[in-house]
Amino acid sequence: MTKSEYPTVAVVGPGAIGTTLAAALHEAGRTPTVCGRTAHARLELRFDGGQIVVPGPVQTDPAEIKDTVDLVLVAVKTTQVEAAAQWLSALCNDRTVVCMLQNGVEQKALVTPYLSGNPVLPSVVWFPAQREPDASVWLRGKPRLTLPDTPGTDLVLAALRGTRCSVDVAADFKSVAWRKLLQNAVAGLMVLTGRRAGMFSRSDITTLSLAYLRECLEVARAEGATLSDDVPQEIIAGLHASPPDLGTSILADRQGGRPLEWDSRNGVVQRYGRLHGIATPISDMVVPLLAAASDGPG
């Protein structure tokens, strides 16, 4: 494909995930339009062996957007979707595909009220990237996305073809999304301790985490996910193998005094558990604590 044959792309939300995708596209000669709240002069992605600098500035005024695009990659937190609605209005025509690069299993439901019938693609993001104090992003793994096998997915495949970000297409996307949700849910325990991944090496935290993951697994299965009994242990094994200083976005938000994605990562298990008549005693403790840490009062 020539440069003009690739889809035109905008990235809304140049945080850790958005910067990674913008850098991957820029490196391949397909620099996207980048939109956000702060007019960064540039975006910088660092990784083992080098860095990629995406020239700015980041667009901060939806009224200044002159052209719509083929694909919008929405990388804002689930707590920021409403605030991003003006960008969607400015960037989308009636054929624009909107791909949600967010946590949770309710991505389509969150964004659909702000669109005019545009195709919406949920995704699962499989790479650790974290914002550094100097506003650069540190990518600590190979970037990879999983998408459902639905219309619109081909556009994302075309946009990212040949970049450092690989894309998997899953026939059973629901199961993949719920598996990632389990991983995100147990990571919420880091907020309550103020600790990073190294805390999971404690035997008591491992025991608690496995019990929580089994609770989440029962809810996921009730929602139609096909996940084996081994998934909780696999997730814990992955945390045990992680660098002890590896964080998570919800911990970074807590440390930064920002609202937390507690509902999309943890509250959803409690809500769907009640819907299916499943007891969720650990969620019933964890969710109010995360909600209070996010929203107060006090």
Image (cartoon, grey):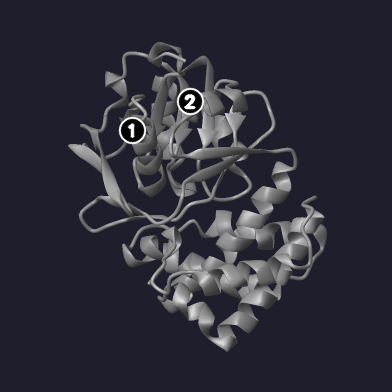
| Amino acid at the residue labelled 1 | Glu
Residue position marked by numbered label 1 in the rendering = 27
Q: Earlier in the sequence, mark 1 or mark 2?
A: 1
Residue 159 circle label: 2
Answer above or below: position of 19 versus 269.
above
Q: Is residue 258 visible?
A: yes
Of residues 285 and 148, the one nearer the viewer is: 148
Residue sitting nearer the eye, 28 or 69: 28
Which amino acid type is marked by label 2? Ala
Badge nearest the viewer, 1 or 2: 1
The CA span between labels 1 and 2 is: 13 Å
Whether residue 296 is visible, yes or no, is: no
Secondary structure at badge 1 equals helix
Query: Can you give x and y, in whole percent of width and height, for residue 92 in the image?
Result: 46, 19
Q: Quadrant of residue 83?
A: top left
Residue at (42, 13) in percent of width and height = 2
Q: Position of residue 79 (x, y in %)?
A: 46, 48
